């Protein structure tokens, strides 16, 4: 068997494929929005950036009527986690009370539970296949 003859067409096919074929869209649907005011700060993380808040993509969405839907286009298929918060006071940060408990609405992918701090990536992480995915996040 001639390896060059076998691998040649495979490599040609890979090079011919558009980079878009390797990109996936992530659609986020946000529920539990109390006041439709302020902005929604949304960040997408891979596992390496989760703990350090080093997002691979982010968006700030002006809120209006209805539940927002945010689409991140062209992500590489893989495992991701999402953090979001509603900035009611316009300072660009998640507001916290005197002992550090958030006083502005926030949420995580998989509606991961919060116990004494943000959830682990293992609880919030989800798979994004090549055909894309939709995650529903509930503000708390």
Image (tube, grey):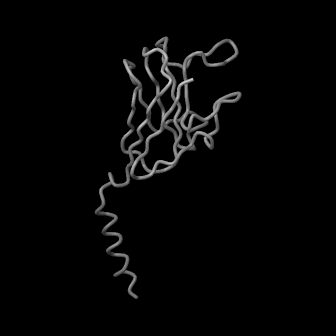
As drawn, is 24 to the left or to the right of 48? left
Q: In this rendering, is residue 48 above or below 69?
A: below
Q: In this rendering, is residue 52 above or below 125?
A: above
Q: Position of residue 112 (x, y in %)?
A: 60, 35
The quarter in which the N terminus is drawn is bottom left
User: Which residue appears at 47% of the width and 38% of the height?
Assistant: 135
Q: In this rendering, is residue 80 above or below 39?
A: below
Q: Nearer the viewer, residue 38 or 50?
A: 38
The part of the image, by quadrant, that contains residue 122 is top right
As drawn, is 117 to the left or to the right of 71? right
**Number of numbered discs overlaid on the protein picture:** 0
Q: Position of residue 100 (x, y in %)?
A: 67, 18
The quarter in which the C terminus is drawn is top right
As drawn, is 99 to the left or to the right of 30? right
Q: Position of residue 84 (x, y in %)?
A: 51, 28
Q: Position of residue 126 (x, y in %)?
A: 53, 45
Residue lying at the far bottom in this picture: please name it: 1
User: Which residue appears at 39% of the width and 24% of the height?
Assistant: 61
């Amino acid at each position: 068997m001639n390896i060059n003859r076998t691998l040649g067409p495979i490599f040609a096919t890979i090079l011919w494929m558009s980079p878009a074929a390797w990109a996936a869209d992530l659609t986020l649907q946000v529920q539990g929005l109390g006041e439709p005011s302020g902005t929604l700060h949304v960040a997408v993380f891979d596992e390496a950036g989760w703990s350090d808040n080093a997002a691979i993509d982010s968006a700030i969405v002006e809120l209006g009527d209805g539940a927002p839907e945010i689409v991140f286009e062209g992500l590489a298929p893989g495992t991701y986690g999402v953090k979001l918060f509603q900035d009611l006071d316009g300072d660009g940060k998640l507001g916290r009370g005197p002992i550090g408990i958030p006083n502005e609405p926030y949420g995580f992918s998989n509606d991961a539970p919060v116990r004494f701090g943000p959830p682990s990536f293992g609880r919030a992480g989800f798979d994004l296949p090549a055909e894309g995915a939709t995650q529903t996040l509930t503000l708390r």
